[in-house]
Image (tube, helix red, strand yellow):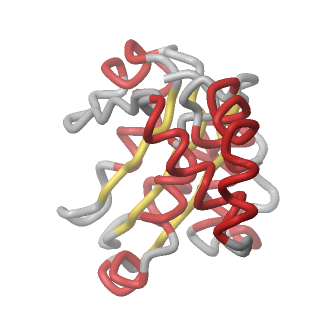
Amino acid sequence: GMGGFGKTTIAQLAYNDDGVKRNFEKVIWVCVSDTFEEIRVAKAIIEGLGESKEASGLSEFQSLMSHIHRSIEGKKFFIVLDDVWDGNYNIWDQFFFCLKNGLPGSKIVVTTRNESVARMMGSTNIIFIKQLAEEECWSLFKRLAFSSRSFEDCEKLEPIGRKIALKCKGLPLALKV
């Protein structure tokens, strides 16, 4: 879905979860972004594996991929690839080939605005996040904006609060900001 739905926030909750940290040897976060640079992403994965020094001299994509392949071997990992825009199968396939060298039970979480990117990456459990309904918007806005106010203040501010919530068009991030 479009920006502001909370895809990254949900991924952060999983990434920071104590159970995730206990169950995976390596927990890695990579912000991919719309300007996909495979060398930067590969180096971020290597950094997340704690292998930066060993790979510091590597600059060729294939050398970085080989290093990831060796470093991930025998490890159970949880990796978040956040904000993936590029659907170039040939490049992502090389990453997945390396990551398949991890232990069974390893997980890759992908956040993207584009369903076709999620499908191209072989996602098995695609979660579609939808806009909040008008009343859900109001309820969240009220909780965020009025939590420390008196009942009288809340009643007084409700009409303007509802207008603001409506302008946020069901986007949780817009409500929060």
The residue that appears at 22% across and 38% down in the rendered structure is 125
Residue in the foreground of this view, choosing between 1 and 140: 140
Where is residue 35 shown, x and y percent of the image? Answer: 75, 23
Quarter of the image where one finds residue 53: bottom right
Quadrant in the rendering for residue 23: bottom left
**Above or below for 32 versus 108:** above
The image shows residue 140, relative to residue 34, as above or below, that is: below
**Between 170 and 40, which is closer to the camera in this rendering?**
170
In the figure, 114 relative to 104: above or below?
A: above
Residue at x 40% of width, y 79% of height: 25
Quadrant of the image occupied by residue 73 = bottom left
Badge count: 0
Task: Residue 78: give x, y in percent of width and height.
Answer: 40, 63
> Whole-percent x and y of residue 47?
68, 65
Vertical side of 117 occupied by 15: above or below = below
* Residue 157 placement, left or right of 155: right
**Relative side of 76 to 43, left or right:** left
Q: Position of residue 102 (x, y in %)?
A: 31, 61
Residue 160 appears left or right of 77: right
Residue at image coords 65%, 42%:
173
**Nearer to me, 166 or 24:** 166
Of residue 152 and residue 59, the one placed in the foreground of this image is 152
Q: Tell me which residue sits at (54%, 51%) in the image.
A: 140
